[in-house]
Amino acid sequence: MNTKNRNLIIGGLIIALIIAVMAPFLASSNPDGLESSAESLEVPESEAAYTAPLPDYAIPGMEDNPLGGVVALIVGTIVVLLVVLGVATIIGKRKKNGTNE
């Protein structure tokens, strides 16, 4: 990874982490459009297809604490960064080896 790409990734990570720290304090407690539409139409809630590791952007047991949201968003940001870097590394190695499969 060259210096330009590294600086871009670090800058993006810093911006994402700033947003992650601020988001729980700026987020509305009101339901979003889809949730409020479902509530007004009295659509029954269905069971989730799977259990999310950090449901509703909160650490289990810290649902009402904004700090739980901050930690969940930071963890999520880092996980997404690692997945993207992993995929980019695999694609880069395939291109370097001349395979596009």
Image (cartoon, rainbow, N blue to C red):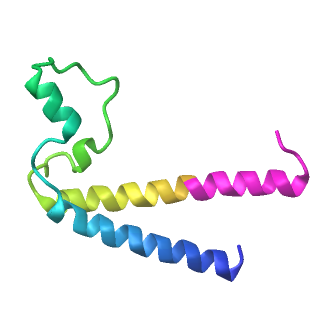
Which image quadrant for residue 18? Answer: bottom left
Q: From the image, which quarter does the N terminus lie in?
A: bottom right
Q: Which residues are magenta?
A: 84-101
Please provide percent x and percent y for residue 94: 82, 50
Q: Does residue 30 sit above or below 2 in this rendering?
A: above
How many labels, in total?
A: 0
Q: What's the residue at 23%, 44% (across, down)? A: 56
The foreground one among 61 and 19 is 19
- Relative depth, front residue between 73 and 38: 38
Q: Is residue 83 left or right of residue 18?
A: right
Q: On the picture, is 29 further left or further right than 18? A: left
Q: Name the image quarter holding the C terminus.
A: top right
Q: Quadrant of residue 50?
A: top left
**Is 75 colored magenta in this rendering?**
no
Is 86 included in the stretch rendered in magenta? yes
Apparent side of residue 13 relative to residue 67 in the rendered image (left or right): right
> Relative to 23, does residue 7 appear above or below in the rendering?
below
5 horizontally vs 36: left or right: right
In x, y percent, where is residue 2? 71, 78
The picture quadrant where one finds residue 25 is bottom left
Residue 63 place in picture, x, y as percent: 13, 49
- Looking at the image, which residue is at 46% across and 70% down? 13
Residue in view at x 17 percent, y 21 percent: 45
Residue found at the very far right of the displayed protein = 98
Is 14 above or below relative to 100?
Answer: below
> Which residue is at a point 22% across and 19% down the rendered structure image?
46
Q: Main secondary structure of the magenta part?
A: helix
Image location (x, y in percent) of residue 16? 39, 67
